[in-house]
Image (tube, rainbow, N blue to C red):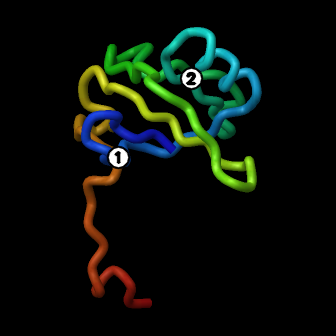
Amino acid sequence: MIQDTDTSEVLMLGYMNKTALRRTLTSGEVWFYSRSRQEMWHKGATSGNRLMVRSIGYDCDGDTILVKAQPLGPVCHTGHKTCFFQQLTEKDAEV
């Protein structure tokens, strides 16, 4: 989970394997592992909208990482500040 270090807003969710975590820790920028493409990806490599790491913590089970980062531009590939810009309504829950 990626959270804006200044606003505490949740920016995005991504998967990290050990290599992605190691690169994130050593570079100071966020890296992910794409399970669908089976490759590493550096957030902002094509858009320039990188995520600069400020701190990394993990949950009590040790299976979820929280990266607090400073976003350098919009985080979502759609151009939105966060990937969580859509609001779920009661109508969306209808089957």
For the residue marked with disc 2, what is the amino acid? Trp
Label placed on residue 45: none
Element under disc 1:
loop
| Depicted 12 relative to depicted 53: above or below | below
In the image, 37 versus 7, the foreground residue is 7
Q: Position of residue 28 (x, y in %)?
A: 51, 14
Looking at the picture, how far across and down is residue 77, in whole percent? Answer: 34, 35
- The image shows residue 52 at horizontal and vertical percentages of 41, 19
Q: Is residue 81 left or right of residue 3?
A: left
Query: Residue at position x 33%, y 80% from top?
Result: 92
Residue at 67%, 25% in the rendered image: 21
Judge left or right: residue 16 versus residue 2: right
Which residue in the structure is indicated by mark 2?
31
Nearer to me, 2 or 42: 2
Question: Which quarter of the figure has residue 34?
Answer: top right
Residue farthest bottom in this picture: 95
Q: State which quadrant residue 60 falls in.
A: bottom right
Above or below, 27 relative to 80? above
Residue plotted at (32% across, 26% down): 71
Residue 72 in the image: above or below residue 35:
above
The type of residue carrying mark 1 is Cys
Q: Is residue 94 above or below residue 23?
A: below
- CA–CA distance in space, label 1 to label 2: 16 Å
Give SS at disc 2. strand
- The residue to which callout 1 is attached is 83
Badge 1 or badge 2: first in the primary sequence? 2
Residue nearer the viewer, 62 or 77: 62
Say which residue appears at 28% left-offset and 86% top-offset.
91
Q: Residues within 10 Å of mark 2 (few under 14, many from 20)?
A: many
